[in-house]
Amino acid sequence: MSRPGAIEVQGVVVEVLRDKLYRVELPNGHKVLGHLAKKDLPVAPLAAGRVVTLEMSPFDFSKGRIVLKQV
């Protein structure tokens, strides 16, 4: 379930950083910092090239929370 007022956007993981942080490239070319949502922490680390969904605050477009959708 997403937060009220959150903006959801899809992106591609381009770089794996330390402490469950990832650099994600959005379709418009911007790169933002993403972290895994708490409910998805037990999941194995994401690899570069994986398509993810980011929840971003409408107040700060430089970072977001990566939410893995259950398929």
Image (cartoon, grey):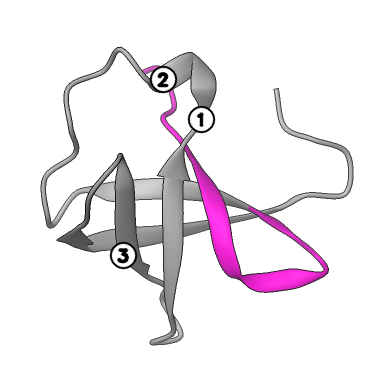
For the residue marked with disc 2, what is the amino acid?
Asp
What residue sits right under mark 1 in the picture? 37
Front one among 51 and 65: 65
**Contact check, label 1 and label 3, Cβ < 8 Å:** no
In the rendered image, which residue does mark 2 sit on?
40
Q: Where does residue 54 sit, x and y in percent of width and height?
A: 52, 50
Distance (Cα) linking label 1 and label 3: 15 Å
Q: Are marks 2 and 1 in contact (CB under 8 Å)?
A: yes
Rendered image quadrant of residue 41: top left
Quadrant of the rendered structure where residue 56 is?
bottom right
* Quadrant hosting residue 2: top right
Looking at the image, which residue is at 41% across and 76% down?
A: 27
Q: Secondary structure at mark 2?
A: helix
Distance Cα–Cα, label 2 vs label 1: 5 Å
User: Where does the C terminus fall, quadrant-wise?
Assistant: top left
Q: CA distance from mark 3 to mark 2?
A: 17 Å
59 left or right of 22 in image:
right
Q: Which residue is mark 3?
A: 23
Q: Which residues are magenta?
A: 56-71
Q: Is residue 25 above or below residue 52?
A: below
User: Residue 64 at x, y = what percent?
Assistant: 56, 55
Horizontal arrangement in the rendering, residue 22 relative to residue 53 (left or right): left
Depicted 3 relative to depicted 71: above or below: below
Q: Nearer the viewer, residue 64 or 7?
A: 64
- Whichever of labels 3 and 2 marks the residue nearer the N terminus, that label is 3
Could you say which is closer to the camera, residue 31 or residue 1? 31
Three-letter amino acid code at the position of disc 3: Arg
Residue 61 belongs to the span the image colors magenta: yes
